[in-house]
Image (cartoon, rainbow, N blue to C red):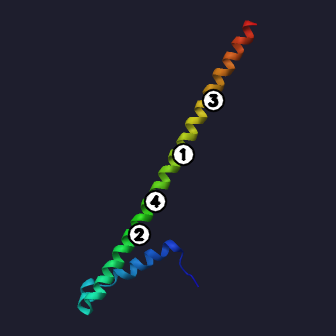
């Protein structure tokens, strides 16, 4: 059974790897030390990638909200100008 959500697995692995001393792994096996370094680097890069994508999507959401607000303001201003012109036109006739 999957006890961890996908994003929690990286944190779980990172926490478990922090308990391991790299020097002791090197003493045990150089090959295992290289694999250990590769796994640690891969996890760190993946965490950075997830954070970067999350920040980028938050930025895009913010830009979208700003564009919607600006469009609403522009539409309101245009509608007010249209109503003003219609009233002037009706007053002339």
Q: Can you tell which quarter of the image residue 40 is in? A: bottom left
Q: Residue at x 33, y 78 (%)?
A: 38
Secondary structure of the residue carrying tag 1 is helix
Lateral position of residue 74 relative to residue 49, left or right: right
Q: CA distance from mark 4 to mark 3?
A: 34 Å
Residue at mark 1: 64
Q: Can you tell which quarter of the image residue 77 is in? A: top right
Q: Earlier in the sequence, mark 1 or mark 3?
A: 1
Q: CA distance from mark 3 to mark 2?
A: 45 Å
Mark whose residue sits in front, 3 or 2:
2
Q: Earlier in the sequence, mark 3 or mark 2?
A: 2
Give the numbered dot on residue 53.
4
Lateral position of residue 41 relative to residue 27, left or right: right
Mark whose residue sits in front, 1 or 3:
1
Residue at mark 3: 76
Q: Earlier in the sequence, mark 4 or mark 2?
A: 2
Residue at mark 2: 46
Which image quadrant: the C terminus? Answer: top right
Q: CA distance from mark 4 to mark 1?
A: 16 Å
Q: Residue at x 50, y 45 (%)?
A: 63
Q: Residues within 10 Å of mark 2 (few under 14, many from 20)?
A: few
Percent position (x, y) of residue 49? 41, 64
The relative height of residue 61 versus residue 35 in the rendered view (above or below) is: above
Q: CA distance from mark 1 to mark 3?
A: 18 Å
The image shows a total of numbered marks equal to 4
């Amino acid at each position: 059974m999957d006890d961890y959500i996908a994003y929690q697995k990286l944190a779980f692995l990172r926490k478990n790897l922090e308990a391991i001393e790299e020097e002791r792994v090197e003493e045990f096996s150089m090959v295992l030390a290289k694999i250990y370094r590769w796994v640690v680097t891969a996890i760190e890069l993946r965490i950075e990638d997830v954070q970067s994508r999350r920040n980028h999507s938050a930025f895009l959401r913010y830009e979208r909200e700003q564009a919607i607000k600006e469009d609403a303001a522009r539409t309101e201003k245009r509608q007010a100008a249209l109503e003003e012109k219609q009233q002037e036109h009706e007053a002339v006739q």
